Image (cartoon, rainbow, N blue to C red):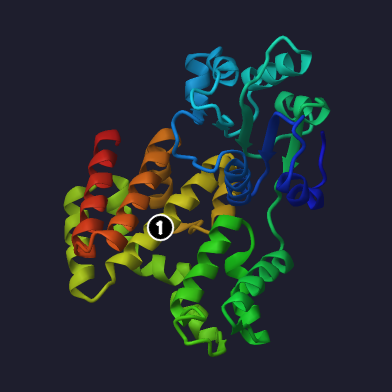
Amino acid sequence: MKLKAHEVDRALQSPAASIRVFLIYGDDTGLVRERAEALARRIVPDLDDPFAVTRLTEEDIKADPAGLADSLAALSLTGGDRLVRVRLSGDNAAVADTIRTLEEGSLIAEARLVVESGMLRPASKLRKIAETAKSALAAPCFADNARDALALAESAFREERLQLPAEARAALAPYLEGDRALARSEIEKLILYKGTAEQRGGADGVIAPEDIAAVSAVGAEAALDAILEPALGGDPAGLDTAFTRAVAAGANPVGILRVLQRRIDQLEVFHASGADASALARTGAPRFGPAADAFKRSARIWSGRRLAQARRLAFEAERSVKRSGAPAEGIVGQLLQRLSRVGASKR
């Protein structure tokens, strides 16, 4: 089944039981991930249940082309719904062939399949079979324009009783356009900076242009490049010096962690968009000079499973900061050193 962009949210909200395969693809990898995650939770509430959810990567499918079909055909050990999730960077003939065998009836799927992919051309095998198969649904995710991104922001701000005047609206727009995940990150940081409605005791708040400048990711990353570059570029000694200096100067370790998470998002967008000059422009990272060179060096080290592992470690560090009560400086410092040592081994 072929969907138009404006039909996607409604179609994924309550898909028909006859739909066994969902291809969610497009140039906005943040929106692809957001929609795939929401859909997956509708199918299987506990995505951490290993008996209910199987995750496969391109490397897994390349190593074992029959593994996807086996995972789809496997019966649930607990009796509930099962889900197979596959994350791709682009077209994949093996996945397309598996969907075709499912459509033809030679494969009986006990699980539903959610496939995430980057941009796919109309002629790609994967997109063509998902658009024509009766048991599949192809959902395109294209980058938000400025109007869509601002509407997303204003909706989130209204929930927290925050107003966005015209001047602040114009200042915020450049930070939102291009990728849904990066846009949500900017929106959430502004809400945290101004305080939620509950934190403000229900009082109304106003977002000013200076608030946006204070928390903008671009400004934060420029100030913290001295940490990001050795952390993701494989320079443990340089990282130790930079992190110590930053903390001594009053840098917030949680703020450093947030900037690291955004850089991981940018690296994922870069790879999913083709890892070329136009992909660099889409990330919001520096495009010229030493900062751009450092980003490219990091991209050569961090991709695929290694990048996914970095994201998981950053998430675990954030959870530890919130739950364990341990000093944030120690948790974030250990994370950065671990990433830097991995980078050093891959240089």
- Furthest residue toward front: 79
Q: Is residue 100 above or below residue 288?
A: above
Q: Residue at x 59, y 31 (%)?
A: 81
Residue 302 shows up from this direction: no
Query: Is disc 1 surrounded by few (<14), some (14 to 19) or many (20+) residues within 10 Å?
Result: some
Quarter containing the N terminus: top right
Q: Residue at x 63, y 44 (%)?
A: 39
Q: 182 and 153: which one is in front? A: 153
Q: Residue at x 57, y 89 (%)?
A: 204
- Furthest residue toward top: 106
Rendering coords of residue 236 (x, y %): 20, 49
Q: 335 and 230: which one is in front? A: 335
Which amino acid is tagged 1?
Ala
Quarter containing the C terminus: top left
- Residue 25 placement: quadrant: top right
Rendering coords of residue 150 (x, y %): 67, 70
Residue 269 shows up from this direction: yes
Residue occupied by mark 1: 291
Q: Number of numbered discs present?
A: 1
Q: Is residue 174 above or below residue 104?
A: below
- Residue 302 placement: quadrant: top left
Q: Is residue 279 above or below residue 161?
A: above
Q: 345 and 52: which one is in front? A: 52
